[in-house]
Image (cartoon, grey):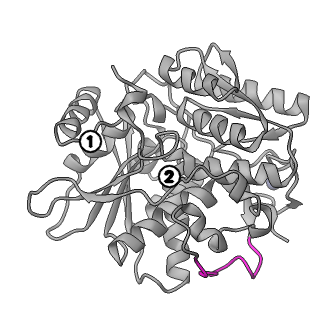
Amino acid sequence: MTQYYCSECHKKYPIEATRWKCNCGSLLSLLPTEHDTSNDSWTNSRSIWRYASSMIGEEYIREFPSVTLGEGQTPLLALDETDGAPYVKVDFMMPTLSFKDRGAAVLVTVAKGLEVKKLIADSSGNAGTAIAAYSARAGIECDVYVSADTSPSKLAQIKAHGATIQSIKGTREDVAAAAQLAVEKEQTFYASHVYNPFFYEGTKTYAYELFEQLGKAPDTVIVPVGNGTLVLGVYKGFTDLLAMKKIQKMPKIVAVQATRCAPLAKAYEDGQPLAEAVINEGTVAEGIAIAAPARSKEILEAVRKTNGTILTIDEEEIVQARTTLAEKGFYVEITSAINYAGYVHYAKTPNEVIVIALCGAGIKTPI
Ligand SMILES: [Zn+2]
């Protein structure tokens, strides 16, 4: 059976509904069984579930047919008609309009398999809306802890799915702490896109899809980074594809942060193994404004192992990138626009095959 595993103290735990961290306080990973590794008997499903056989913990995701909303298999398109134009992965074409559906679908499927009746999530918005939608579909009661300044359109989406919103004044870290306190008090399932490693079994399908759409690995993937759900998913997915011998080289991961909240970029530049918490000075890229990313060690390792880099982008450039993308037909959430700004800054080489992530729909943050 698949188990949870602590990479700090090496303790193992069975997969149980109320387990969300190690007794030593560290975050958990999934310890694959022999069956889990390199199983590429993919199906014809037109969703992320095509790759169910390659997800770790296959025995915990059997409930997916009653949870799926058809997430995944999003388009990969050329950004425009210019020579050497990068590709864009249009992940805002998802059931709840963001890439977070990849992880949320898997996480709620696991919760249903564990017969969870109620779950708790915390989110700056997109993960919360995704968890709320899949919980509604799965018939699981859902509380979502959000920051008091979350955009009204995201809150409306969460409410529409019947989830209970717990609005917390304070930092993103205060919101997470309040959710974790409730999880402990109520002894229920913590549907955290940061703590629960099943989330990454969903986001790694992003890499599988890129591989199938291109017929090879891209050279470079440009993704936003806050808590690292996409960076880690991309890294895990391409690591699997290397193990399956479907690709020969690991693409570079170029991660992008807002200058006004960039703990990972600072740690990367300073050669540090962990990110130190910074003060969030406030950024329009609210979806990645994470001052103290809990999985910073894994994120930094992933970027370094791929010979990638972490870029920082100023506010005006994020706003400008949003306008530029919209003028090309792609109306993305302002946080997602940072990836295009990252591309503009990135020192590309001739013929480099680059993919830019378009993670969330513009309607989520209309201003
Ligand atoms: Zn531990």
164 left or right, relative to 310: right
Q: In this view, does 220 lie above or below 222?
A: below
2 left or right, relative to 323: right
Q: In this view, does 202 lie above or below 333?
A: below
User: Residue sitting at 83 percent across and 33 percent down?
Assistant: 183
Tag 1's secondary structure?
Answer: loop
User: Residue sitting at 56 percent across and 68 percent down?
Assistant: 45
Report if residue 311 lies within the magenta region: no
User: Residue sitting at 86 percent across and 48 percent down?
Assistant: 17
Which stretch is magenta?
A: 32-42
User: Who comes first in sequence, dot 2 or dot 1?
Assistant: 2
Q: Quadrant of residue 169?
A: top right
Callout 2 touching callout 1 (CB < 8 Å): no
Q: Which residue is tagged 1?
A: 330
Q: Which amino acid is tagged 1? A: Phe
Mark 2 or 1: the one toward you? 1
Q: Which residue is tagged 2?
A: 230
